[in-house]
Image: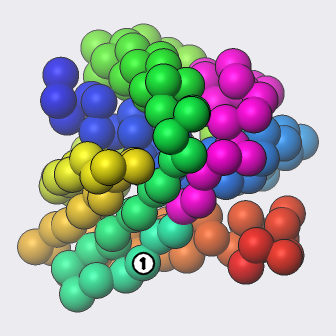
Amino acid sequence: MKRLHQIALLFAASALIVSGLAFAGDDAWFDMENCTMCKNLTKDPELIHHMTWQQLNISNGVIAITEVDAEYADSYASCSAGMAKVGEQAMQGKQMPLCNSCMAFGGLMMKGLESERVETMNGEIWLMTSDDPAVVKDLQKWAARNMAEVAKMHPSEG
């Protein structure tokens, strides 16, 4: 269950920054409206405006840093719990619509990606690593795409 919770929180971190906007079409990288995982992010429409997030490359993977304003900690926890439930269902083989970012990350997990989540006073730090250089390359490509998609939608946030 801890691994599912970690998967769900990473999905949350990677998608929250897009401010709840749905992207239309089959090529949607993030899709808050149709992705079963990402739908959890819109339950509290104010949450995404009260957090910061970034993904940074490290030698063997990616580190994700999320900070949430204290008054939205419960909302973030609720969102994460909903995503964990979806992650559990996916691991049990339930078919559901997912955006391209979520599908890509799930594929990385299936390739043996390791993750470790560390709670901080106002958020979390998440290490995603692999000893396999091909998985590291794909993970870093995924993280770069996440950040590029965010930058397209919110140029002022970089």
Q: Position of residue 46 (x, y in %)?
A: 75, 34
Residue at left 39%, top 63%? Answer: 64
Q: Can residue 21 be spotted in the picture?
A: yes
Q: Is residue 128 left or right of residue 9?
A: left
- Scheme of image coloration: rainbow
Question: Which quadrant does the N terminus fall into?
Answer: top left
Whether the magenta-drawn stretch holds residue 157 is answered as no
Residue that numbered label 1 is attached to: 56
Q: Quadrant of residue 90?
A: top left
Image: 113 above or below 37:
below
- Foreground of the two, 28 or 55: 55
Q: Is residue 55 left or right of residue 16?
A: left
| Mark 1: amino acid | Leu
Residue at left 34%, top 39%? Answer: 7
- Foreground of the two, 74 or 104: 74
Identify the magenta region.
33-53
